Image (spheres, helix red, strand yellow):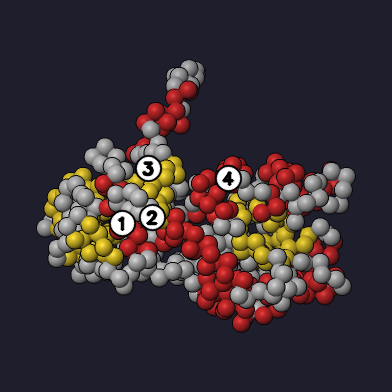
Amino acid sequence: MPSTDEPCADHGVEATGDRIEPTGADRGVAARRDRAVRAAAEQGLLGPETPVAGLLDVTGVREAAAALRTAFDEVTADGTPVLHAFAVKAAALVPVVRLLADEGLGCEVASPGELALSRAAGVPASRTVLDSPAKTHGELREALGLGIAVNADNPQELARLDALFSAAGSPAPTGGASPVGLRVNPQIGGGSIGAMSTATATSKFGVALRDEGARAWVVRAFLDRPWLTRLHVHAGSQGMALELMAQGVRETYELAEEINAAAGHRRIDTLDIGGGLPVDFTSDEPPAFAAYARLLRATVPGLFDGRYGLVTEFGRSLLARSGLVLARVEYTKTAGGRPIAVTHAGAQLATRTVFVPASWPLRVRAYDAKGRPKPGPAVAQDVAGPCCFAGDLVAENRALPLLEAGDLTALLDTGAYYFSNHFAYNSLPRPAVHGFAPDPSLPGGIRFALVRPQQTPAEIVTESGEAQREALTDLRTG
Ligand SMILES: Cc1ncc(COP(=O)(O)O)c(C=O)c1O
């Protein structure tokens, strides 16, 4: 049985000669997407020698950021400090981080590279949170020096922080400004994707709270360290039930209450509840920020009464819906009777989708060479990528209008964890990413802005050890 994508005509627009008109029912994300594909083809962003690019809907990103802010504004007491820190790993692109900062968001970073690019985007230290599970001594020292919030992952990291503080001759962080927290794992169980489930009994993240003696150890750790003022939990992500995520937050809140009672004052002043809101990869539904915030409010009312500051760390839910990968069909053929379209988007871009298709299915849209939604009856076919291994398929046996050479395919909902998580198989280049927004003064009604240029062959050679060309031949082997 072919897997069925949404009906082929469900584009939210109708092709009317040279114009594309919104159908009325949908002037939102689907209509913007179709206009952008058409404009990308018209303006030459895609072509025979530029066969793949990422497109990012700036309106959609701003809408998602606004929805997140509103969702939490509606459930928190007036005056509660709330920092929405975008999880940079979801789209490690300076202009994207800058756009979200413009929408009032900060950053959650998990490596020196992510920290450097969030700084390059102008995100201040006071709106940055460092979370990696494997921070080096140097990374910790840098973060404390900058005044960035740090969430320690485990007892050894806490001991390293102890040493850093006492080396600085102070019981408080060097810069004095870094709030420090401890990540806990409430061990509430996982969701439908094991690799995305951070709160299982044996997860590598945080202090496993239900392990014998762990809870008492955490309480003691706080009582012994006046500078430890936050608890952090990230009980996501894709494939997790919202109720389970909310339970993880509740258990963390209850621990904060216990620690504060033991300390006799409000030692923990902020809870960082992480991100992890799943995205529906089968529809254009907007992210469920409002539903999640209301569920949290119902499950953990005390978290919202103004006694605790809040940090969130959403990634996928902020960006997925607003991105698409557009790729040209280079050739078509049949094998064993099945049509195959060989495109330029495969495992190098949609790595999870290609290797674990059951967990990461993507909607695929068919457009003609001019970027118009492709008409025609649905035919089961494979949509393949350019990588040299047989399994490099972004859709298998998928019912779509029959693709032809020169057509365009769009991989939808790829705004998070696709553009910047490149897999350099076959030394294929990282593609260009273009942001788009409506502009009635332009022919296609869309203005593009380059977010990141396509990687050049020369850059690939440089990154592949060009300067070390003779390194191995010069090594004497005995
Ligand atoms: C600590 C932490 N916070 C936030 C996120 C973002 O999660 P999501 O993109 O699912 O919202 C992640 C993702 O891995 C994470 O590890």
Instruction: From this view, report whether residue 34 is shown above or below residue 68.
Output: above
Neighbour tally class for label 1: few under 14, some 14-19, many 20 plus, Cα within 10 Å: many
361 and 336: which one is in front?
A: 361
Marks 1/3: CA distance? Answer: 21 Å
* Mark linked to residue 392: none
What residue is drawn where x is 35% and y is 39%? Answer: 428
Q: Nearer the viewer, residue 73 or 214?
A: 73
Viewer-nearest of discs 1 and 3: 1
Q: Which residue is mark 2?
A: 438
- When asked about the image quadrant of residue 305, the answer is bottom right
Mark closest to the chain's N terminus, 1 or 4:
1
The residue under label 3 is: 431
Q: Nearer the viewer, mark 2 or mark 4?
A: 2
Indicate which label's residue lies in the foreground, 1 or 4. 1
Are discs 1 and 3 less than 8 Å apart at CB? no
- In the image, residue 412 sits, relative to residue 428, either above or below, namely below
Q: Which amino acid is tagged 2? A: Pro
Q: Quadrant of the N terminus?
A: bottom left
Q: Residue at x 70, y 73 (%)?
A: 78
Q: Which residue is mark 4?
A: 121
Q: CA distance from mark 2 to mark 3?
A: 23 Å
Q: Nearer the viewer, mark 3 or mark 4?
A: 4
Disc 2 and disc 1: Cα gap in Å? 9 Å
Q: How many angstroms separate mark 1 from mark 4 (CA)?
A: 29 Å
Residue type at numbered disc 3: Pro
Query: How packed is label 4: few (under 14 Cα within 10 Å), some, or many (20 or more)?
Result: some
Which comes sooner in the sequence, label 2 or label 4?
4
Badge 4 marks a residue whose secondary structure is loop
Which residue is at a point 57% across and 79% down the rendered structure image? 295
Q: Residue at x 66, y 74 (%)?
A: 76
